[in-house]
Each structure stands twice: as C-alpha cells, then as structure tokens.
Image (cartoon, coloured by chain):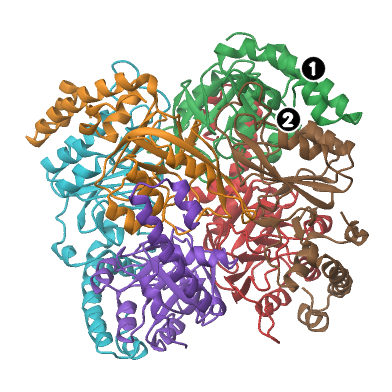
Chain colours: A purple, B orange, C cyan, D green, E brown, F red
C-alpha cells in the first residue's frame, strides 16, 4: 500500500472532518459511541477490514472459529489498522483483546478500530496500542460470532471503510479518508490548521468572535 | 443578572438535586448521558441559551451559518454558562469546540452545557474550561444544524432551562435551579450538607445505618 | 456464606467469562453499559441482592422509604457485594452514594454493583470502594423508587444473580459465577491464564498467530 | 367518584390535548408507543391505578402473585379505567388479557390502559373492550412482575395519572385530564370543536389556509 | 414541475427500491418506522418540503407559529406531496392532521409524508388522503416545534429529499426517486415487474427456485 | 421430521407461553416487535433456520448472493416454517417477500418467521401465507446481507430456535417449543385451556375474581 502521509501527525480528527465536509464527504466520522481506550493516543494508518456474522452455537469439533481473523492478523503490514465490523453498537461480542493486540504490535500494525466490544483493556492500555471501540466487555466471539470475510468494504459505526482507506483517530473520534481524496484532504487540512491558529490567538486577545470570523472565516 | 451565590461552591449536584426534590421540583437534573469533559471541574453560573435546528444542506453563498451563535458568544458576561439545546442525545453535531471555548474564557464565561457533541476535547481539557456534553465527536454544525434562537427557554437533556437560571455541574451531573427558588434551595442545601457530615462520621464509626437514619433523617 | 476463593485475585473478567462459556453458561457477563467508577479496582465477593420498584410520589408522612435498603446494608458481612437491580439501564434513579458506601466499608463489604445510577462519585472514588454501575447521576430514590425485596434472585444488567453467587468485576466488566460451578470455573480459569501467558510470549517473539493458536488453542 | 361528563363522548384526543396545552398542561398525552387494540373504540372513564415491580423468580409455594391485582379488579365500579404502570415500554410482561377484561366488563369498568403488553388480543377485540397498550405479547406476569401498589399516583407512558383522573382514549392516543381542570378543559374543548368545524368547511370550499387561520385562529 | 410519469401507478415500492439499488442509490427507502395510515393507498407525487425546529415555549403574543407551514400548504399544486422533516422518529409533535389534509385535498395535493406524528387519524382515513408517518399522537406543534424553512433539501426518515423529487409510497414503505435518475428508474422498474411476473408463474407451477433464479435472475 | 401435533390448532400463544413457563422455560416467546402480517392467521410448523450476515457491497460478478437461501427454500417439506435470523430488529434488510412465499406455498411450507423486514406485504396477505416479522420495508438483501448458514441453531427475536423445534404464532406473538418438551407442553396446555374456559364462564356470571382464582388457580 502507498505510504502514509507524514503530515497527518500534526492534524486532528476535527480538522479532517471539516475538510472532508468541504469536499462534500459528510459521512466520514464514526458515530460517537466509538471511543478510544486511551484518550492520549493518535491512530494513523490504512484500513485492513473484517466482517463478523452472528453465530448462536459452539463451533463444531475441529472447526477453527478464528480462521479468517488469524489470517487477517498474520497478513498485517506496518501501518495497517485493523477495522472490525460487528454491526455495532453491540452488547454481544468483544472481537478484540490483548493477544490480538500483541500479534499486531509484533507486525508493526498501527491500531484497531471496531464497533464491537474490546476486552483486556488494562493490558492494551499498558501496551499503548491505539484501540477505538464500541464498548468494553469480556465476551469472546467463540459461539457468538465469526469473521467470515476480510479485506472487503465494510460499514463500521456508520462509515463505509474500504481496504486501504486512511483511518485517523484521536480523542475526538475516528475519521476515514477515502483513497481518492486523501492528497487533497491532507493538503487542505494543513491550511485550515494554520487559519485556526490565527483565530485562536485573536480570540485569546479578546477580539470579538464576529470580527475574527469575518476576517478569517473559521470557527 | 443577579450575582451568583458564593455558597454554591461548597455544594454539589447531589445535595442540590435532593433539595430541589424537597421543593417539589423533581425534573431539574439533566439525564445521565450528559457528562463532564473533566471530572474535577465544578461549573457554576447563569444560563445563556441557544436552540439548534437540523439543516441538511450547505449554507447558501454569503450566508453566515454561525450568526446567532456568534452573537450569543460575543454578548456573554462573566459568570454566564452557555446552554446549547440540540434535541440530544445526538450523533449528528458538535456545536462546541476549542475556538468557542477560547472566546468564552476571554469574556469570563463560566462554562458550556450542551446535549450535542463537543470537539477539540484535548485542548478544552488543557484550558480547564468546564464543559458538560452529550458526547464527543468531530462533526461541525455547518451543513448539519444552525442556531436559530437564543436567550429563550430551552429543553436540554430533559430539563427546562430559562435564561438566567442557575446551572450547577460536577462529576455527578448537571442540575438547574430556577430563579424563583434559588435562595431557598441554596439555603436548604447548605443545611443538608452539614447533616450529611454528621451522618458520614457516625457511619464511619460503625454505627448502624438504621440508627443514624432514625437520628438524622438523612441518607 | 462459604469463603471466597483466594485464587480469584489473580484472575480477570475475560478469562472467567471464557471459562463460564466453556461450561455452557454464556449469559454470565453483565451488559457493557455497566462500568466501574474506578478502572483500577478489582471487585470480588458474594452477592447480597435488592430489587427496586418504581414509585411516583413522595413517601407518606412517617413512612421510611429506605427501610429494606437499610436492613440490607446493616446485615452485610465482610466480603459481601451489594447487587441492586433497578431494571436498568435507567435515567431515573441513583440508589447508591457516599453514605451507603461508607456504611458498607465499615462492615467490610466488598463493593456494590447496580444497573441504576450512582452519585457522590468523587467521594466514592476517594474511598477506593469498588462500585460498578449503569451510569452517574444525582437523583435520590426517594419519590422515584423503593427497594421492596432483598436477598432474592434478581436480574441485573442481563445476568441472573442469586444471593451468594460469586461476583467478579474489573475494567473489562462484571461476571457472575453461580455457586454450583464456582469450584470448577476457578480451577479451569487458572489453567487458562497460564496458557495465555505462553501464547502472549510466543506472539511477542513474533510467532505467527496461526502457529500459536494451533499449538496452544488459545486466543 | 364524581360522574363522568357526557360531553366527552363528542370530543377527541387531539382537541383535548390542545385544550390541556391551553391551560399550560403539556405533558398529558401518553407517548405514541401506546396504541389501541381496536382503532374504532373510544375510552372514557376515571383512573384506577396499579404499579408493577420486576420479579425474577417464581412465587413461593402458596403465595398468590396476583393478590393486589385481583383486589383492584374486584373493587372496580362502573366507568372505572384500569391504568397499569409497568415502567414501559417493556418486552417482559403482559399484565392484561381476556380473563381480566371479562371480569372488568362484568363490573361495568370502561377499559384498560397499560404501558405493558397485552395478550388474548383476538378475544378482547371480539368483546369490544377498549384496551390501550404498549404492545402485544403472550408473557404472563407470574415470575416476571407483581403488582405491589394500587390506587396511588403512577406514571404511565410518560403521563402522571392520579386515581380519579379522567382518562380519554381514541385512535389518536390516550390523554389524561387531571381532576382540578376537568370542567374547564371539557368546556373549552367543546368550543374548539365548533371552531374546527367552521375551519374544515372553509378549507373544503377551497379558502386559503392563511385566510381561514387569520379569521378563526384554529389549525 | 414536470409531469409525473403515469407508469408509476403500476409499480410498487419494492421494485422501485431494487431499481434504485441497481443504479447504486441504496439510501432511498425511508426507515421502517414510517407507516401508511391506510395500507391500501398508493402515494405518488413530487416533494414539497418543510423542516421543523424544536421549540420549548408558547409563541409570543401575536406571533403566528404556523406561518411557514401555512405558506407551504397554500402554495401546493396538484400532485405535490408534503414532506415534513421533524428529525424523527419523535414522540413530541404531530405536525399533520385533518385540517391540513383538507386544505391539501382542496388543492389537489397527492399526500403527506412526515417522520413526525399525525393526528385526526380517523378523519384522514375517511378522506382517503394518503399519509405516511412516524407514528400517531394528538400533540399539536404549537409550543413544541415550528416549521422554519420550506422547499429546501431535507432528511426524512433517513432519506435525503429534494424539492421536486418523486415520492412513492405503498404498504411496503416510502421510496424517494431523485430527479436526475427518474426516467431511467421508472423504465428499468417496469422491465423488472415483467420479469417478476414470469418468476411468480414458474414458482406457482412448482419449479425449483434455483432453476427459476438461474433462468430469470430475479428474486 | 416427526409429525406436528394436531392439538396445536386448538391452542394459542398465550397458553403455550404459560405452559412453557410452567416447565421453567421462560425465554420461549419472541419479543413483541415481531408482528404477524395478518392478525387472523395461525402459524404452526417445524423450524427450518437460516442466518444472515451483513454485507456492504454488491456481490461480485457471477456470484449468486441468494445461494444458501435458495437451497433452503428448495429443500422445504410440508409443515416447515422458515425462520430467518437477521440479528433484528433491523432497518436494513427485508429477506422475505412474495416470490419466496410463493415458492414456500408450492412446497406446502407452513409460514415464515423473521426478525428482519418483509416486503410485498399486499401480495403475501392476499395469498394468506402466515408471516411474522420484525417490520415492513422494501429493501432487498442483495448488497446488504447474505444468508451464510442454514439448518443451524439461531437466535430470532430473543429466542433460541433449533431446526425441528415447533413454532407457533398467532396475533399474540410467536412461541417456540423445543423438541424435548413438546409432548408435555402440548398436553399441559390443553388442560389449561379447559381451566380457562371454566374461569371465563364464572367471571362472565359476575363471580369475584378472588373466588374464581382461589377455586381454579388460573388467571
């Protein structure tokens, strides 16, 4: 996959969301039930997707319920972000935990985003591995769900995510930048950041918001 | 607006809620989806309100979608609390962020309460500006909603808030004290706090809860 | 009540949930809306239950609305966990707070689990008393609900809890272990932990997840 | 209880709701999840209330779980409306069915309103007994809930209902008229109906809505 | 506005939805909480839109809270469909009722679609005026909401509706056909209907579904 | 599969639910969002199950997205009830419609139960084919979901359904009777019906409910 633009590290979810709005892509921010396990970590990478289906019985003898999941993780490259679509928000399954995070970090993957639950939260926080999820809970997927497809377009927390899309997360949430617009979005977002800096300075000095907005056009 | 009672600083949302119950006002605590960005900050001030309507298209050329919002913020006085009614909980809009917080602080405003989302959470936390909100998300209101009225009665997270009402927030939630009862409520709440102190001491000493409750009538 | 197995302290909610799954008990983890007030505290003890009914008017003169609640708390023994069933999630009532926590600690009780709200969060956190709840809010039960039964089977956040059941909570959530299976579950869970340790080590060394899973059968 | 105003039969839920709004009572219409079993039946009577609490185990041997319920029904007088508060909407319990409807009709009771579920729908429809409910389902309350209080103020589908309040239901929903305002509300509602008749006639003739509204002030 | 294709009368919501899917427009069917007041009526026309904002106080003296609404209705032409966006589903407001339906019919308007509630259901059904709504309830908008804009793009029950878009409703739901694709969609839908007829005949004769699908490609 | 007990035709969902409660099976009634398309039809048969997974893109060229579904329908025998698990309630997919109903009837299948949506409601009602569903909507599964497994245990509207379980539906809802208890449940339910007849007669004659319940033990 193409390299990940370095400039992203100086950006944030809010400015990226505004910039995507500016190119008429208004459905790129995941719903607010998606929260980071660690508010201080930034997530930047390219999507590697998986889809879960509900399952209501234990796997048959000899069957490996984690087969597709394992294949996905073992195929990760540095900078990849695992995106797991569970048709969330859900109360039923926690498809992500410490062992998968450990395997990811060993491969240089950048983080995980899932609209399912996550478990082993204490350990994942200690690892400082960026995970954004739809909730916390101890429930294994075995006997409850199974990943059936990977590296296909998915819907996660209200956003369509295609394999290779840029995924950006910080305390404000998760934003997905489609491949086709990523260059333009990153360029424009950087410009907006500098406008915001001017705006902030003026407001701190006590200028009227009306005047600042008139002059800089930023809020 | 009248000065804000100093005694409020030694009170808390729970005791104020109990006291409001005691004067038959049982709908004064905002619903629990409303959470502070910073659990350690106390919010005390008088309400300055705004109402949003949903919008489904970008503003017309030359139109300022933030007009009423800007007017509200530029009109804030020290001790004012911005209360933004978005018919929340919502997944659609974050009407509050860093720049508005900056403008507020420059005017001495006390904080912001909104049943919408909030963005720029990291920066707002660093500013130690008290914000209570219905969630976190990066979505600008432009093209999604517009403040259409200000300084009118609103409903925010289940509570009717009139301009000038006392707004109190801490880690337990947000409570609204109508003008007509504020003197009585503050006075009674202070009395209740001292009763609670006695109760706590007795319980720590291992007294039976039944005895303590019989004696002090507080739980 | 029987003593509480010491081994529980080295376990966690995720491994206990997996082990309960393994004995065909798949409804033992409380729903994810249940969260600890303090992510760092472990809760271990035996359930002492109470059920609330909704009430829509102030108690009659001379009536003690907290009667059953007080009796329950005054009857607690060391290691007991108060489990309050409010038919949650709810926005209406906070049956737990600082004074009850204080009374509990004085009796050596281990903590509280409620699908209702909790108040006095700051003080409870300072006391380091483990509380898992369905949310935070200042609303007293008086005039809103009343405990009508205690020490009966209840449903709390989706799990049936019988008096005496083991209750285990950590940052991943709350798991309930029925009396009949507790010995087997604790034994098996300890074994699983040691398998997970091997698995983690192998993954850190960069082994393929597929190989590790094939060898250890753990994910 | 006082007689029930005859004029109610010529009124409807919408005009009563408007009239209650006109006397500043804006919370008198039950939420729209409440629907009649039979769209063609009008319900008019005075409230006789009951409150349910959740129960999670079969009743003890010899215990009568229906005790309060039976006492309420056996005490009904002609024109009474049974109002059952289940903290609905609920998926758990159907406190009303054919046998209770039969007992009610035998006493001349006017109907039943519950935010719980109802069962035996076919038979109740055949009896033409007016029932408004929060849904349909076969689940008995035994082992799931129990009426613990009767003839007390309740909240049903968002409306406070006191014993003796007038309850009015038709296809548009259920409206509750507190005792203190019932005379005024009925009188005003009758006036409004005649205004609406004029308005309807004018609109049918093709008059501009703007003109009709200006002249009659009704919409 | 352009004439409405006659062919629509022989089509249905399901086939139109499939055809819109076929041109990659997969968000054109309103959510299933939208139901017709009368299952037997077909709704066909072009959208005339209005947006409501929440209001929490009675209108000021002399203010006409229905101003924009009245202007919209008085401006309707034959074949227009009123589409009222209330950010539904909602429990708060019924923006549509008998008098507005009467005014609409007098102008030849084709029906009404709203994600708010509707009242005067009995009378509207008797008029056989096609209304699709998010629920039934008696609550007037006065003091609860106000139409603030009309003839702008809106979101109604999950679908973006632009003024002039074709709106089609039957017992299966409401589908919106954007202007740009209406010719193609209507043409393709007619072809699909004839394929379905062949498929139905074959299945009735007892042919294997697998064979029919292989031959006709329709399910 | 074993024959279907004839006695079921004289029973109803409420009495079956009570009887299942009586054998400690209290999770056998589907949630109340499940409603019949036709209130007058009784559904009796044995379950043939299918599970859907969410899909977010059109099927690949040449791929048949309906493959498992078609195989299930073509394999139906007289008296089979198709049970489609969509993890409902859902707004996204209508896996059932006229053509599948037609194919089912041609094979003598007894009906369909799905927690997804259903389309072609008018035609299915005309066919008098019993369908119980989670809602109505026009949305095809193609590009939205795909049946991935069939004839496995599923969860549908809150009830576990195993292939071969008896499925009973009427206007009061859908009840599932596991194979292991079906004989006992049917026998007991018939006894209960005769007790209810006596109870109804007594109540009609005006007997006190308390007396009737004391004598017959039925409510």
Q: Residues within 10 Å of mark 2 (few under 14, many from 20)?
A: some
> Where does residue F158 sit, x and y in percent of width and height?
53, 57
Q: Is residue B157 above or below residue B166?
A: below
Residue hosting label 1:
D194
Chain letter for mark 2, please: D
Q: At 86% from the left edge and 40% from the top edge, which residue is drawn?
A: E128
Residue D117 lies left or right of residue D105; in this view the side is: left
CA separation in Å, label 2 and label 1: 29 Å
Give the position of the N terminus of chain B as an image quadrant: top left
> In terms of image quadrants, where is residue C14?
bottom left
The reply to whether residue A70 is in sight is: yes
Q: Residues within 10 Å of mark 1 (few under 14, many from 20)?
A: few
The reply to whether residue F24 is in sight is: no
Give the position of the C terminus of chain B as an image quadrant: top left
**Foreground of the two, F185 or E170:** E170
Which residue is farthest top? D2
Q: Across the whole image, how many numbered discs are drawn on residues?
A: 2
> In terms of image quadrants, where is residue C8?
bottom left
**Foreground of the two, D217 or C113:** D217
> Where does residue C123 sit, x and y in percent of width and height?
19, 42
Q: At 24% from the left edge and 58% from the top edge, which residue is drawn?
A: C39
Marks 2 and 1 belong to one chain? yes
Residue hosting label 2:
D128
Kindly state the secondary structure of the residue where label 1 is placed: helix
Chain letter for mark 1, please: D
Kindly state the secondary structure of the residue where label 2 is placed: loop
Q: In this view, does A57 lie above or below E117?
A: below
Q: In this view, does F175 lie above or below C72?
A: below
**Foreground of the two, B216 or E162:** E162
Which-is-in-front pick, marks 2 and 1?
Answer: 1
> Where does residue C86 sit, x and y in percent of width and height?
37, 41
């Amino acid at each position: 996959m193409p390299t990940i633009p370095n400039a992203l590290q100086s950006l944030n979810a809010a400015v990226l969301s505004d910039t995507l709005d500016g190119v008429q892509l208004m459905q790129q921010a995941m719903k607010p039930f998606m929260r980071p396990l660690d508010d201080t970590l930034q997530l930047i990478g390219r999507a590697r997707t998986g889809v879960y289906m509900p399952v209501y019985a234990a796997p048959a003898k000899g069957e490996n319920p984690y087969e597709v999941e394992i294949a996905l993780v073992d195929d990760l490259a540095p900078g990849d972000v695992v995106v797991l679509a569970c048709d969330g928000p859900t109360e039923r399954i926690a498809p992500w935990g410490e062992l998968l995070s450990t395997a990811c970090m060993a491969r240089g993957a950048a983080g995980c985003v899932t609209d399912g639950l996550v478990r082993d939260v204490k350990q994942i926080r200690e690892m400082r591995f960026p995970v954004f999820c739809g909730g916390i809970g101890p429930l294994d997927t075995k006997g409850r769900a199974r990943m059936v497809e990977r590296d296909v377009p998915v819907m996660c927390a209200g956003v369509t995510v295609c394999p290779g899309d840029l995924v950006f997360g910080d305390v404000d949430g998760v934003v997905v930048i489609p491949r086709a617009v990523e260059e333009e979005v990153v360029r424009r977002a950087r410009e907006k950041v500098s406008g915001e800096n001017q705006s902030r300075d003026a407001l701190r000095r006590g200028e009227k918001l009306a005047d600042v907005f008139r002059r800089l056009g930023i809020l």
